[in-house]
Image (spheres, grey):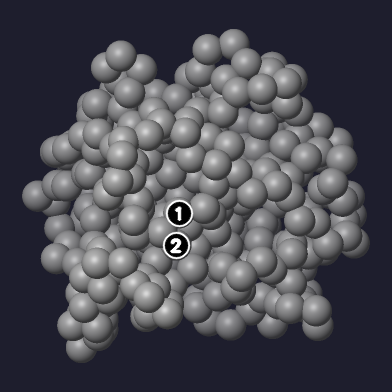
Amino acid sequence: MVLSKYRLAALAIFVCAAPTLAVAQFKPDVATLKAEPVEITATVIASFNRIGAVQNHFGRLDWRGGLVLTSPSPNFGGWSGLVMDPDGKKFISISDSGVWLTGELTYSDGKPQGIANAKIGPLLNPEGVPFKRGRDRDAEAIALVDGSVSAGSILVAFERNHRIVGYDVSKEGLSAARRSVPLPGDAKRMSRNNGLEAMTVMRGGPYKGATIAMSEHLLDKNGNHTGWIWAGAAPQRFNFENIGEFDLTDLASLEDGTLFVLERRFRWLEGVKMRLRRVSPSELQPGRTIKGEILIEADFNSEIDNMEGLAVSHGKPGETIVTMISDDNFNHFLQRTVLLQFSMTGPQTAKARP
């Protein structure tokens, strides 16, 4: 296999990083963290491709812009889930350290420019205190149930201690844990580190209001991924075709029942990759193995990192905006928190508007 100069450089970085991977997984203690404003510096990513000619079209998506996010706060990092209001401004992100982040994404000429009014705080247990054990605070996905990200209710999916927990949201941040969602029986087969990594609540379509969650890497006998739809009396299982041994990292949905699936793959010899697929409302059905349409696939020749959070919002009429955020594993030397934004237009996206 012939590697590009950039891939050789990336490989050297990852190999040299091998002894530090355990350190990279260190997560700060949140036991004494209180909800408070947080300073975030945003550096604009001008071009999605790192090398070669500047271009704006990638797969089925058009590049809008991106940011590298940094903060002096020791609790800033590990962002694994993302949800945004339909206008693409206010957001909530959750970290696998057991922390939430709220704020407003600002724009200049339609491109992401910075983060304003940011606030950070700990995820709380039903007693109103931060989770003490590391296995209890590994939050991986977030979904908006109703209302908005500043006045509504959300679900948060955790792995290691696998569960889905409900929270209320206000301008002050997230409440103490309010309720839990019963998991399907076969979710017990999820390994400690391959739990409910991807989740959304359907905005519309045949399963409007239903929670959909997928395991990061729980395969059926045919080697395909596993997901569940919380519709009816009990969660119903479906499978998602495994193309190229990617893991699943997040879900998002549109008002017509379209489902977006974010995927990630890491190998020592190739670095990290990310991929986004779109599933039509008619294809998403319990008991089926669904495939979807690949919208974009990218590797380290592009400005990606460990992409784990996904949200969709609306742009101009007929335009869907896709926003992704990365989990830097609190390894600030080797990884970055990047926020990437793309747009998509066409008949299918035009139908998805409320």
Question: Is 188 in front, or is 62?
Answer: 62
Query: Alpha-carbon neighbours of circle 2 within 10 Å: few (<14), some, or many (≥20)?
Result: many
- Circle 2 sits in a helix, a strand or a loop, which is it? strand
Disc ID at residue 298: 1
Residue 239: which quarter of the image?
Answer: bottom right
How far apart in space, not on screen, are marks 2 and 1 (Cα)?
6 Å
Q: Which residue is mark 2?
A: 273
Residues tagged 2 and 1 counted as in contact (Cβ below 8 A) = yes
| Residue in view at x 59 percent, y 11 percent | 317
Q: Position of residue 173 (x, y in %)?
A: 36, 37
Going by the numbered disc 2, the residue's amino acid type is Lys
- Circle 1 sits in a helix, a strand or a loop, which is it? strand
Residue 118: which quarter of the image?
Answer: top left
For the N terminus, give its image quadrant. Answer: bottom left
Q: Position of residue 161 (x, y in %)?
A: 52, 74
Query: Alpha-carbon neighbours of circle 1 within 10 Å: few (<14), some, or many (≥20)?
Result: some
Question: Is 76 in front, or is 146?
Answer: 76
Question: Is 281 in front, or is 242?
Answer: 242
Q: Position of residue 34 (x, y in %)?
A: 23, 49
Residue farthest along the bottom direction in this orientation? 19
Going by the numbered disc 1, the residue's amino acid type is Ala
Q: Is residue 82 visible?
A: no
Residue farthest along the top direction in this orientation? 317
Q: Position of residue 192 (x, y in %)?
A: 53, 81
Q: Is residue 198 above or below residue 14?
A: above
Q: Earlier in the sequence, mark 2 or mark 1?
A: 2
